[in-house]
Image (cartoon, rainbow, N blue to C red):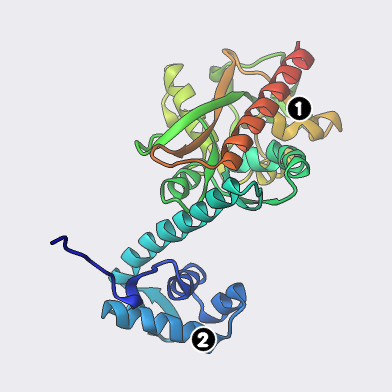
Amino acid sequence: MRASFVLPRAQSSMADRRLQAFHAVAKHRSFTKAADALCMTQPAVTFQVRQLEEQFDTRLFDRANGRIALTAAGEVAFEYAERILSLSSELSARLKELSGQEVGPLLIGASTTIAEFLLPKILGEFKARHPGIVPQLSVANSEAVQIRVAQRSLDLGFIEGDSHLPTLVTDVCCDDELQVVCAPSHPLATLASVDLTALTEHAYVSRESGSGTREVIDHYLQKCGLKVDALQVVMEASSPEALKGLVATGIGFAIMSRVTAEKEVRLGELVHVPLAPRLTRRLCVVYPKERIHSKVVNAFVGFAKERLAAKQGADVRVAG
């Protein structure tokens, strides 16, 4: 006689309102904000979370002094909730595809440089072709984007350089040149190109630790025979916009993607100076190895790679 196994009704569907409520509270660290995000009342969210805690017979949150923190069990539950809800969303998207529908969210992560200076136009063009798709762009440094893709809270991510996470696949989109950027009054501004030895004599404004740009520059220094701390770092900034603002004051030079300062260079506010030898990096898209990708994800990856490669070609022609 064949044995049968039936889950209790309370455990038959993990991607239900209880899990959604818990995930929202854990993400926002607030029952009120979670209720707003889910279009529910706060008592309803509290009830759903309490039911989940009763189901697992454990506390998921510590509530003390007006603050909410995940317990050890809550941390584990949050990790699984991210994956379960993501898979549930993926299942819904795949089934809609089979019926010919092209609707739903597309969760994209991107490093700051790519998100601010390369993706906006690409996303706009893709949206025009696929009006039923709702792209959601999350901006963080390359390290954070990779982690979120690995955790399945993002469908895919665009990063600077290759991924070091074994669970992710890395596809190269295009190359990007990094150059010295400085104020027109800076001593480096008059040079046709500049080598690293000359850079060590001037104040340097750096990106923050974890930035893909910073990692590429550090590797470049080492490859050229210099220590990572050879440059005179006077300040760090966590975004290209902040970096440009600081450099424009004359406080020092920065090394950044040439695309991030194109407008300021055209306006005469900043100057580009190529490095010698030239410094280029790869811009890549990453996604989980084992994930079954929807047609929409595959379509966007192909579309973005095509547009980025076309822009790279145009930039090369202009520079030449």
Residue at 62%, 45% in the rendered image: 239
Kind of residue at disc 2? Ala
Kind of residue at disc 1? Val
Between the C-alphas of marks 1 and 2, the distance is 56 Å
Residue at 39%, 68% in the rendered image: 14
Give me the disc on residue 44. 2
> Residue 219, image x and y in percent?
45, 25
Q: Are the residues tagged 1 and 2 within 8 Å (C-beta)?
A: no
> Residue 81, image x and y in percent?
40, 63
Number of on-image labels: 2
Return the disc, 1 or 2, that comes first in the chain's sequence: 2
**Mark 1 vs mark 2: in front:** 2
- In the displayed structure, 306 sits above or below 77; it is above
> Looking at the image, which is closer to me, 109 or 50?
50
Q: Is residue 237 visible?
A: no
Residue 236 relative to residue 125: left or right? left
> Looking at the image, which is closer to me, 223 or 126?
126
> Looking at the image, which is closer to me, 263 or 153?
153
Would you name the residue on which mark 1 appears? Answer: 271
- In the displayed structure, 194 sits above or below 39; it is above
Q: Specify few, some or many for label 1: CA neighbours under 10 Å numbering under 14, 14-19, or 20 or more.
A: many
